[in-house]
Image (tube, grey):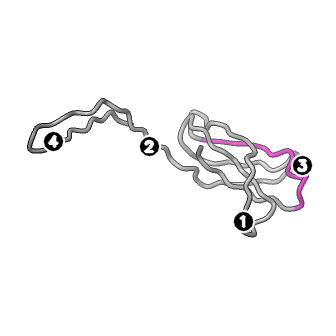
Amino acid sequence: MGIYQAVISDGTGSITSSVVSLVVFIPPQNLTAHASGAGVTLQLKGTTNYPYVLQSTTNLTRPVVWQSVVTNPADATGNWTFTDTNSSLAPVRYYRATVP
C-alpha cells in the first residue's frame, strides 16, 4: 500500500495529479477442499479483510457457467474458510475462488 502522485511535464510546463492510494491485493492462493458429513469445506490464503468470491459449476465443458456461492472477506491473518452444505445437491461440483 502506498500514496502516489504523478507529475506530467512537457516543454510548456508541468502538472501534478491528485494524491491517490494504491493497494495491491494478493489473489487467492492454494484453494483446498475437504469433504465431510457436513459438506465440503474450502480454505484459501489471501489478503487480510479482502473479499473473495467462491464459485461453483457442475460441468467443465465449454462454455463453463460459474455460479457464485458466497462472497466473504479473509480474516485478520488472510485465511478464508467456507463450508458448502449444499454440495450434496449435485453429483459432481467444481469450485474456484476469484476476486470481485
Give the CA distance from mark 4 to mark 2.
Answer: 27 Å
Location of residue 13 in the rendering, given as x and y in whole percent from the top left corner: 11, 37
Q: Which of 29 and 89 is in front in this view?
A: 89
Q: Which of 68 and 92 is in front in this view?
A: 68
Location of residue 11 in the rendering, given as x and y in whole percent from the top left corner: 8, 44
Q: Which amino acid does label 1 sit on?
A: Pro
Q: What residue type is labelled 3?
A: Gly
Query: What residue is pinned by disc 3?
Result: 37
Q: Quadrant of the C terminus?
A: top right
> Crowdedness of circle 2 by 10 Å Cα count: few (<14), some, many (20+)?
few
Query: What residue is pinned by disc 1?
Result: 63
The reply, left or right, for residue 38 in relation to residue 75 is right
The reply, left or right, for residue 14 in relation to residue 38 is left
Query: What residue is pinned by disc 4?
Result: 9
- Total marks in image: 4
Q: Which of marks 1 and 3 is nearer the N terminus?
A: 3
Location of residue 26 in the rendering, given as x and y in whole percent from the top left corner: 50, 47
Query: What residue is pinned by disc 2?
Result: 24
Q: Give the range drawn in magenta.
A: 79-91
Q: Which amino acid does label 4 sit on?
A: Ser
Q: Which of marks 3 and 4 is nearer the N terminus?
A: 4
Are dots 1 and 3 in contact, CB under 8 Å? no
Are dots 1 and 2 in contact, CB under 8 Å? no
Disc 1, SS: loop
Q: Earlier in the sequence, mark 1 or mark 2?
A: 2
